[in-house]
Image (cartoon, rainbow, N blue to C red):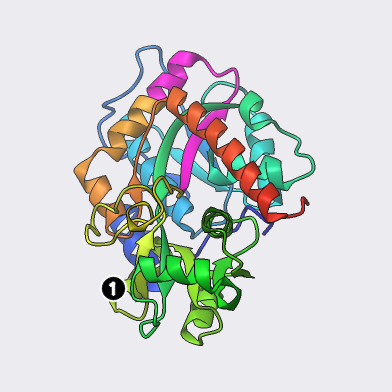
Amino acid sequence: MNKGDTAPTWPAGTRRQFLGRSMAGGAALLAPGFPRIARAQDGYPNRAIRIVVNNAPGGVGDLTVRLVGQHMSEMFGQPVVIDNRGGAGGILAANQLLGAPADGYTLMTAGNATAVRPALFRSLPYDVQRDFASVSTMAFFPIGIVVSPDSPLRTAQDFIRKAKEDGRDLNIGTIAIGSTQHLVAEMFKATVGSQATTVPFSSTPQLLNALLRKDVDVGFEILAPVWSQMEDRTLRVLAVTQATRVPNLPDLPTLAESGLPGFDAASWNSIVARSGTAPEIVAKLSTTINTILNRPDVRKTLLDVGVEPRGSTPQDLDALTAKEMVRWREVIETAGIPKQ
């Protein structure tokens, strides 16, 4: 898996619970089994829709799109096929989208990693803003600052103070270079002027083992894959890096309210179509996805595993993507991360 493509994996039990509740097995072909309650008057869709996922199966983004795809199938009365094409800087997935007609029957997952890649790669055979038509965000994945249970860092303020005053003695663990977790750690260091060392690992389990062995002092990781460790108190979370508190963790503070006003960063994913897709099809897809994400059962399923369902208009997704592209390019350049 290439830089910018890495996604944390779920603890096995959590993944099985999610799949069992939302997918009854997680099949790639989501067949309709409910009344066709949202068929477009113009006939769209009148056949299967394929969603190309630019990550391997099993990560938080993959499981989120499978849940959304299941409900799309129910509402449209048509199958929704989940097609995982991870790796190669999103090129494999993009080739599938751009090689298909711009008719709304082939969609693709995108997100913050898509916005990061132009600054990480010397060249890409696609242009994020020119070739993709924004549909809607799907979910945001809060990133937590995690420590071992007996860490002397008891609060977010302790961590910020340590990073500022004794940064040379502080090791911050993340997953792969170029991942959102890694870039958020670099963004934090630049914000507080810290000389802390960032230590990237190839997977979430390796990061967690390093935390428990005291090889690193803190970790920046998406909450979903460490949810069970957080619940059984084998890890502690000091704060989240997004601007708002996690809905079902109301006592967990943010960095912004812990001494870094304005700090706001999270991982997120979205759905895009091929540029040139009819605006009415894009609008119907966006409305459908937002309706799904606002369903109480869908919200509960996602919130229970640390994922925040959050839809958007196509225009808001355009603005978010543009903002993220500028923000992460600046972080990458400041951190001196070389391009591939």
Q: Where does label 1 land, which residue?
A: 231
Please identify the quadrant where the N terminus is shown: bottom right
| Residue drawn at x 34%, y 76% as measured from the top left | 154
| Residue drawn at x 76%, y 54% as measured from the top left | 338
Is 269 within the magenta?
yes
| Residue drawn at x 39%, y 21% as measured from the top left | 284
Provide residue 92's location: percent of width, then percent of height.
69, 44
Residue 184, placed above or below residue 279: below
Residue 289, placed above or below residue 251: above
* Amino acid found under the numbered disc labelled 1: Glu
Provide residue 101's location: percent of width, then percent of height.
62, 23
Is 171 within the magenta?
no
Residue 285 in sight: yes
Left or right: 303, with 85 as reference point: left
Q: Nearer the viewer, residue 249 or 299?
A: 249
Quadrant for residue 52, please give it.
top right
Q: Nearer the viewer, residue 207 or 14?
A: 207
Left or right: 50, with 275 as reference point: left
Quadrant for residue 328, please give it.
top right
Q: Residue furthest front?
A: 165
Q: Which residues are magenta?
A: 267-285
Residue 107 in sight: no
Q: Nearer the viewer, residue 39 or 250?
A: 250
Residue 108, placed above or below residue 19: above
Quadrant for residue 97, please give it.
top right
